[in-house]
Amino acid sequence: MHPRYSAPDSVIEHPILQAHAIGLQVMLFPILRVHEKPTPDHWRGNLKPKDPQALQAAYTQRLTHLARLAQKQKVAVLSVGSELSSLDTNPAWWHPIIRGVRKVYTGKLLYSGNWDHFQKVRLWDQVDYLGLCGYFGIAATKKLPPLYEMTAGWRDLRAALERWSRINKKPLVFTEVGYQSQLGSAHAPWDEGAKKPLSLEEQRRAYEAFVRVWNGSPRLAGVYFWNWYGWGGPTDRSYTPRRKPAADVVRWWYDGPHP
């Protein structure tokens, strides 16, 4: 537990209650954060614990606690992990974790694989949804690619991901899809440290490309756009679509249905 990042139960429960009050369902999506980053590639996907059993025990304890909270508040979906690429190829490490969660939680479970690693994940048979952090590059150019190029990029990905979903016989959920409002964001949306020139239009086109391609997909169970927090606005270069043209694309799509 971290005093800044680990929310107490009451802070988790409050927005769940608010969401349920207006008719929304909820996914609880815990994320393991790395406390320090001595190198740029030091992140949760590269964890190499000296004592895997100790990490497993601590992880099980925390996740089971959250599972009880999710059961109490009738949360529809609980994620058991996200982007843990160095750990998600070992199904035996996950068996006791997921077994413990299933004992106290009756909702659906999801794991979220990283966009460049999801095909190597070996615990899809233990969960109900195929979660995916979808930071795929959808354009070859780095300077305001045309919409048709971004759309073509997502169209090829949709075909491959729907085939993967059918093979695993489980629906797909994008747990993260996002683009910074910068030039080059469609080329490398995963580059959260990018500091390129402002481009609200590139972000908007990337959102529109996603909506155009995935609208009506029979394999898509849901999508979470990363992310909403922050003030946003016309001078902001971060991921949030808030108070930007990209938000209008999301609003239009969620207002559906659309042909």
Image (spheres, grey):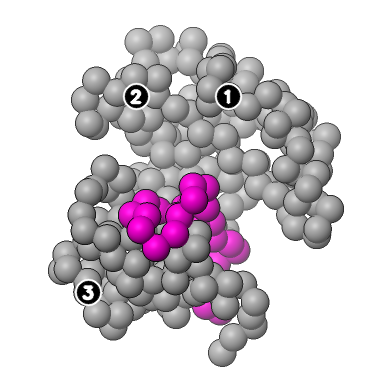
Q: Position of residue 228 (x, y in %)?
A: 52, 53
Q: Nearer the viewer, mark 1 or mark 2?
A: 1
Q: Is residue 50 left or right of residue 94?
A: left
- From this view, report whether residue 55 is shown above or below residue 226: above
- From this view, report whether residue 214 is shown above or below residue 126: below
* Quarter of the image that includes the C terminus: bottom right
Q: Position of residue 30 (x, y in %)?
A: 57, 34
Residue at 63%, 18% (x, y): give it: 61
User: Which numbered disc covers residue 229?
Assistant: none
Residue at 65%, 77% (x, y): give it: 255
Of helix, strand and loop, which mostly describes the magenta segment?
Answer: loop
- Mark 2, residue position: 47
> As shown in the figure, which amino acid type bears the numbered disc 1?
Ser
Residue 68 colored magenta? no
Residue 22's quadrant in the figure? Answer: bottom right
Q: Position of residue 243 (x, y in %)?
A: 50, 63
Secondary structure beneath dot 3 equals loop
Residue at 50%, 67% (x, y): give it: 247
Q: Earlier in the sequence, mark 1 or mark 2?
A: 1
Secondary structure beneath dot 1 equals loop
Residue 219 colored magenta? yes
> As shown in the figure, which amino acid type bears the numbered disc 2?
Leu
Discs 3, 1 touching: Cβ within 8 Å = no
Q: Which residue range is magenta in the image?
A: 215-241
> As shown in the figure, which amino acid type bears the numbered disc 3?
Pro
Mark 2 surroundings within 10 Å by alpha-carbon count, few (fewer than 14), some (14 through 19), many (20 or more):
few
Residue 188's quadrant in the figure? Answer: bottom left
- Mark 3, residue position: 145
